[in-house]
Image (cartoon, rainbow, N blue to C red):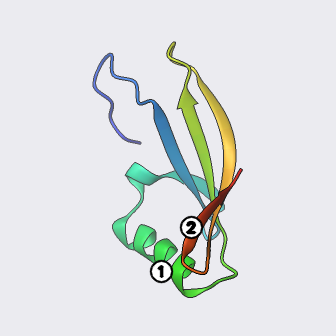
Amino acid sequence: MSEQKKGVHHAIKLSHYSVSKDEYLDIEDMAQEHLVNMLYKLVKDANYLANFKIKVSTGDGDYVTDDATLEFTGMSPNFTV
């Protein structure tokens, strides 16, 4: 897991669902090869959907969470929440 400096809270955390690992991985902690592979699949395969979990800070140390799916339609990226 990424180290955070004391007293620093990230406003947004983004995690990608890895089918091969059957879990969400923080984007900051993903191996570069895994991230590049996911982006390649998004561009190459029109049917590929990348699933994400988005956490937004409430400002008091807690987060609200939502799921989102990213797909490329034509070459226009679309997030579906």
Q: Residues within 10 Å of mark 1 (few under 14, many from 20)?
A: few
| Kind of residue sitting beneath label 1 | Tyr
Which image quarter: residue 10?
top left
Across and down, in percent, residue 64 comes to: 64, 29
Tags 1 and 2 touching, CB below 8 Å: no
Judge depth for marks 1 and 2 and give the one in front.
2
| Disc 2 secondary structure class | strand
Q: Residues within 10 Å of mark 2 (few under 14, many from 20)?
A: few
The image quadrant where one finds the N terminus is top left
Q: Which mark is residue 40?
A: 1
Residue at mark 1 to residue at mark 2: CA–CA distance: 13 Å
Q: Earlier in the sequence, mark 1 or mark 2?
A: 1
Identify the residue at the far left of this view. 5
Give 23 or 44, whichever is nearer the viewer: 44
- Considering only vertical position in the picture, is 78 above or below 43? above
Q: Which mark is residue 70?
A: none
Relative side of 59 to 81, left or right? left
Relative side of 75 to 4, left or right? right
Give 26 or 59, whichever is nearer the viewer: 59
Across and down, in percent, residue 56 comes to: 55, 32
| Kind of residue sitting beneath label 2 | Pro
Across and down, in percent, residue 19 comes to: 65, 68
Q: Please name the residue shown 51% across and 46% down the image.
A: 14
Give 63 or 34, whichever is nearer the viewer: 63
Please name the residue that numbered disc 2 is placed on. 77
